[in-house]
């Protein structure tokens, strides 16, 4: 048993409110205490978590999840299929980002340890969707009037190997305690503390000093610039894995000139991809392809690499009718006004935004950077109050909806990180076709079509592909990483052992 029995994890994912569901970051951490139905193994295969397995109707509209036996909430109450039914229905009716559930779920039935969900259209990706929705105890949450806004510093009743004991905003940490009713495998640690730091430098110094055992940031790597210093301590191993998460430039396709394919093509030629790789990934990334989807994903196909050519960018703009007639260095639209794009970003994208501004201005496209907090970005993005934006995909996001990044672009999709800007019937039909079949041969063909669509139409421009690095204390063994959430999974928190 570890001397202090506390596993300490550093992050820069800040919890801003003790809202179990409503706070984005707390919603990432709470999978530890309130497991979703499904999870992903280290090879990317979907397997049961709270559910033992699932069954699907031939038309992919009816899904039955069989709940594992011998699972208990931290207050001693058994976990039931009623808890699952209540939770999923609650998300669909009360949580804005889960609006798709409310729009498509038509019936829910419970039979013993089975819960069946019926939808008004085929949805072959449901098992993946259900890796992200934490299941809640009905006997606690059914009396809460507005779950999305409910706040408490804890404790929260959970059914995982740990329950969330305390959200300490002053200390900058969330504290999980071992679930006394847990019947599964247990780790050496009675407590898991996740502490957030104001920036990456502060988090890195905490690891280097030995205060923290590992670093985790959702869909992100340990800061590349800090890897050498941490390695030199001799106390950490580095886990390096290619990821399907990437940073990209998104267009508001509802506005001109972003709606013009020629304009998007010119923008793609104006970007210095190798410089972005060098600056942003310090050698842990590479120049992406036009097909958007990185090699880390199943179904990847080879498409042409993104190519930087400033002369091509300028010629493409001129051929499409965008000219600098007054010689001020900025091209004009059809109405004769200078084209100055509103680049909306979250504060964490400031470095890439300045590079993007520099690249586009060299091509004659004006850029004004508007940097806002996350919640403001979500609001402005949903209102389509921008011209272009820098954002990212996550491994889960690349798989959600119809897969292969479709969830970021399909105009019918809702969610905090999605742009929902593509309403091209060709693209929408492709998404629907994917969601209505389980035939692997057809799916392989659809994956190819999706990537070819991205390559031809450029609804978003990938800026770089990368590997993610996770450091962990050499004295602790049993770390387990999956493509969705890295080390933040049940296998890690039931398997880590201390050799100290």
Image: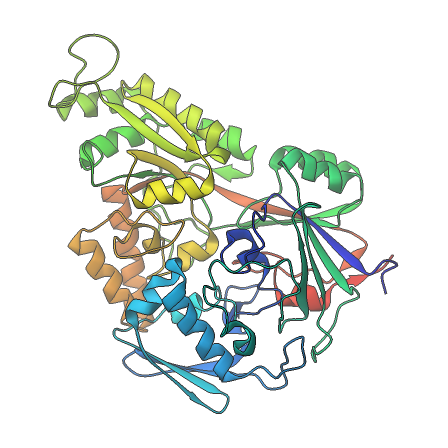
- Dividing the image into 4 quarters, which one contains the N terminus? bottom right
- Judging depth in this view, the residue of 216 and 261 nearest the camera is 216
Residue that extends furthest to the bottom in the rendered view of this protein: 112
- Dividing the image into 4 quarters, which one contains the C terminus? bottom right
Residue 373 visible somewhere in the drawing: yes
Compared to residue 54, the image places residue 419 above or below, namely: above
Describe residue 367's horizontal placement relative to residue 187 as left or right. Answer: left
Describe residue 34's horizontal placement relative to residue 131 as left or right. Answer: right
At a point 62% along the width and 64% down the height, the residue shown is 32
Residue 104 picture quarter: bottom left
At a point 55% along the width and 60% down the height, the residue shown is 20
Residue 485 visible somewhere in the drawing: no
Q: Position of residue 267 (x, y in %)?
A: 29, 29
Residue 329 picture quarter: top left
Q: Position of residue 302 (x, y in %)?
A: 35, 48
Q: Position of residue 314 (x, y in %)?
A: 24, 20
Residue that extends furthest to the top in the rendered view of this protein: 327
At a point 25% along the width and 52% down the height, the residue shown is 411
Residue 398 picture quarter: bottom left
């Amino acid at each position: 048993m570890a001397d202090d029995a506390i596993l300490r994890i550093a992050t820069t994912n800040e919890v801003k409110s003790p809202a179990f569901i409503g706070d984005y970051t707390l919603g990432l951490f709470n999978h530890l205490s309130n497991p979703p139905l499904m999870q992903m193994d280290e090879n990317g295969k979907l397997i049961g978590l709270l559910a033992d397995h699932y069954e699907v109707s031939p038309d992919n509209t009816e899904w039955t999840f069989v709940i594992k036996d011998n699972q208990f909430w931290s207050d001693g109450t058994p976990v039931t299929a009623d808890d699952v039914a209540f939770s999923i229905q609650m998300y669909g009716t009360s949580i804005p980002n889960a609006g798709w559930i409310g729009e498509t779920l038509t019936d829910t039935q419970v039979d013993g340890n089975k819960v069946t969900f019926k939808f008004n259209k085929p949805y072959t990706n449901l098992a993946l969707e259900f890796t992200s929705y934490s299941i809640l105890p009905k006997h606690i949450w059914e009396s809460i009037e507005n779950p999305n806004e409910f706040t408490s510093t804890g404790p929260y009743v959970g059914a995982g190997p740990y329950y969330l004991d305390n959200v300490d905003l002053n200390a900058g940490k969330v504290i999980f305690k071992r679930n006394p009713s847990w019947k599964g495998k247990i780790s050496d640690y009675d407590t898991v503390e996740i502490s957030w730091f104001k920036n990456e430098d502060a988090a890195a110094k905490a690891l280097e000093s030995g205060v923290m055992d590992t670093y985790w940031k959702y869909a992100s790597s340990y800061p590349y610039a800090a890897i050498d210093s941490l390695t030199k301590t001799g106390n950490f191993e580095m886990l390096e894995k290619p990821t399907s998460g990437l940073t990209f430039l998104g267009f508001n396709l509802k506005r001109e000139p972003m709606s013009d394919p020629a304009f998007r093509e010119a923008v793609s030629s104006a970007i210095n991809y190798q410089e972005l790789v060098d600056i942003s990934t310090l050698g842990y990334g590479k120049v992406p392809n036009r097909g958007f989807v990185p090699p880390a994903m199943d179904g990847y196909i080879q498409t042409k690499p993104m190519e930087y050519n400033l002369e091509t960018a300028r010629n493409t703009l001129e051929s499409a009718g965008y000219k600098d007639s007054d010689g001020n260095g900025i091209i004009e639209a059809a109405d004769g006004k200078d084209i100055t794009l509103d680049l909306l970003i979250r504060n964490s994208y400031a470095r890439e935004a300045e590079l993007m501004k520099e690249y586009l201005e060299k091509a004659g496209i004006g850029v004004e950077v508007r940097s806002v907090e996350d919640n403001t970005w979500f609001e402005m993005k949903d209102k389509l109050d921008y011209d272009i934006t820098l954002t990212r995909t996550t491994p889960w996001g690349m798989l959600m909806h119809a897969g292969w990044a479709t969830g970021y672009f399909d105009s019918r999709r809702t969610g905090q990180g999605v742009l929902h800007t593509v309403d091209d019937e060709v693209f929408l039909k492709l998404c629907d076709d994917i969601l209505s079949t389980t035939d692997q041969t057809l799916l392989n063909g659809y994956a190819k079509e999706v990537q070819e669509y991205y390559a031809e139409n450029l609804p978003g421009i990938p800026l770089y592909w990368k590997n993610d690095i996770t450091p962990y204390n050499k004295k602790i063994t049993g770390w387990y990483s999956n493509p969705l959430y890295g080390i933040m999974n049940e296998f890690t928190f039931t398997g880590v052992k201390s050799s100290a």
